[in-house]
Structure formats: C-alpha cells, structure tokens
Amino acid sequence: MGNADDKRTIEDLANWFLAKEPMTQKKLQKLCYYAVAWGYALMDKPIVVDSEFEAWVHGPVSPTLYQKYKSKGWNDIPKVEKAPIFPKDVEELLETVWATYGEQSGNALEALSHTEKPWKEARSDLSEDERGNVKISPKTMRAFYLSIYSGDDK
C-alpha cells in the first residue's frame, strides 16, 4: 500500500455512499460507521484517516461529517456525481457494506447500531437520551464485528 492509499478522508467515504443515492445524514453516518467498523474487523486498519466515531444518542456519529452536513437537518443530502476511488480491497468492502446495509433507512440503521456492543459499551455510563461524545473503540469494533462475521474468505 502506497501513501496515496492512506489519504482517504471520512468525506471521501461519505461521497462514495452519496454517489449511490441521496440520503439523510443519519443514514450516511451509519453507513460510514459500518464501513469503518468492518474495515477494522476484516482489514485490521482504519480505512480513512479521520475515522473516529462517537456514541451519540442516535447512534455512532463522525463529528467531522456532522459538522459538514448539520445544516441539512433531517433532509436528504444530494447525490454526488462521481464516487471517489478507493484501493480495490477497500472498494470491495464498501460494496459489501452497501449491499448489506444500503437498503435500510437511517432509523433502521440507528436501531441496529443500538443493539450492538461498540455503541452500547461507549454509552454505558450515560442514560438513554443523555448527550455524550465518548469515542467508540476501534478495538471493540474489530472484536465485535469479527465475532458476527460469517464470511468464508478470511
């Protein structure tokens, strides 16, 4: 892997999903989260440079993406024309994440993330609707998603 591969940002990741369809920030946040989480699980590395997610009330959130798209509120973020290029292995991972989670709504993905250990563990000291910005541990992401992985190629 050359250095160029290591320069993809969370915005690049968001644009990759937005090249598929317009969507709400909630859905976009969760798709990016699942891409990063599965990247830790299956590739044992962050797939983007700014890959931190925090355990917010509505599920995992990238503060970087939140700042970029908060003006959209609950409205769809428009589709982008051209998807950024990722290394082939990451591209395959993203296609799998899209195939797995892409048809679900933001609310469905939020509900799913709330049942999973990485978010629950990061929120363990907070009440249900208490604001918090505890970082979700990449180690926990990796361990949890590996534990539910049923693929046959790793």
Image (cartoon, rainbow, N blue to C red):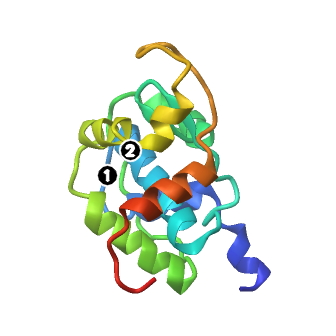
Residue corresponding to mark 2: 77
Give residue 84's position: percent from left, percent from top.
Answer: 53, 71
Residue 91 in sight from this viewpoint: yes
Tell me if residue 113 comes above or below residue 43 in the rendering.
above
Q: Amino acid at mark 2?
A: Ile
In front: 68, or 107? 107
- The answer to whether the residues at label 2 and label 1 have Cβ atoms under 8 Å apart is yes
Point 78% across, 79% down: residue: 3
Give residue 125's position: percent from left, percent from top.
Answer: 56, 19
Give residue 25's position: percent from left, percent from top.
Answer: 41, 40
Residue 80 in sight from this viewpoint: no
Instruction: Identify the residue at the far front of this view.
Output: 147
Residue corresponding to mark 1: 22
In front: 22, or 33? 33
Point 68% across, 53% down: residue: 50
Q: Is tag 2's residue or tag 1's residue first in the polypeptide sequence?
A: 1
In front: 35, or 4? 35
- Is residue 28 toward the left or the right of residue 124 in the image? left
Location of residue 46 (image quadrant): bottom right
Point 59% across, 34% down: residue: 67
Q: Secondary structure at mark 2?
A: loop
